[in-house]
Image (cartoon, rainbow, N blue to C red):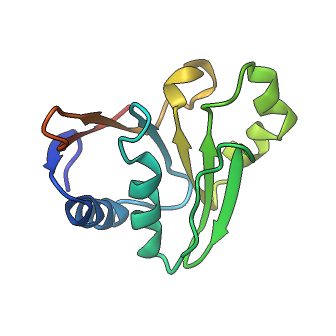
Amino acid sequence: MVIPSLHKVYTEQDTEKLAIEFSFLLNPGRVIILNGNLGTGKTFFIKSALRSFNIDGVSSPTFALVNEYIGDMKFYHFDFYRIEKIKELYDIGFDEYMNDEEAVKFIEWGNLFPSVLPHRRTEVEIILQDDLSRDFHFNSL
């Protein structure tokens, strides 16, 4: 996979294949931002990518705000959807998580608080089309 790129998927199996392909780009310290409306497949994409690292049981951290997974690598999975103020992020130690260079960080709904995102990151925008296909836009900043 090259970045930037655009990929269209039609099925969950297509999304899984794309996530596995993307997983080859993951290395410690990398930050991935996933944006898209509710139900576009952000968590499913992350879950599929993490299977490549022998991690099962991935779930959305909507209420916990962050989940930690350890398999072949360490991952932090954030969800900004229910956060109302940036202070909530700092209350859970967001800076410490972000400074952990041994972990890959996934952030869903990162567009809600762009001021806390690192300058170097990969962004994945998922757009649900009328035919229920999804466009995955990958970009690096």
Quadrant location, the C terminus:
top left
Judge whether 65 appears above or below 125 on screen: below
Residue 108, how many percent across, how many down? Answer: 52, 40
**Left or right of 106, for residue 135:** left
How many marks can you see?
0
Determine the residue positioned at 59% across, 77% down.
Answer: 71
Dividing the picture into quadrants, the one containing residue 73 is bottom right
Residue farthest along the right direction in this orientation: 91
Q: Is residue 104 above or below residue 135?
A: below
Q: Quadrant of residue 25?
A: bottom left
Residue at screen point 60% across, 21% down: 113
Residue 82 at x, y percent in the picture: 67, 30
The quarter of the rendered structure image containing the N terminus is bottom left
Outermost residue, front side: 131
Residue name at image x 62 percent, y 45 percent: 78
11, 118: nearer the viewer: 11
Please tell me in which quadrant of the rendered image residue 26 appears: bottom left
Coordinates of residue 27 in the picture (x, y in percent): 47, 61
Position of residue 135 measured from the top left corner of the image (x, y, whole percent): 20, 39
Identify the residue at image location x=20%, y=61%. 14
Q: Nearer the viewer, residue 77 or 39?
A: 39
For residue 115, side relative to residue 38 (left or right): right
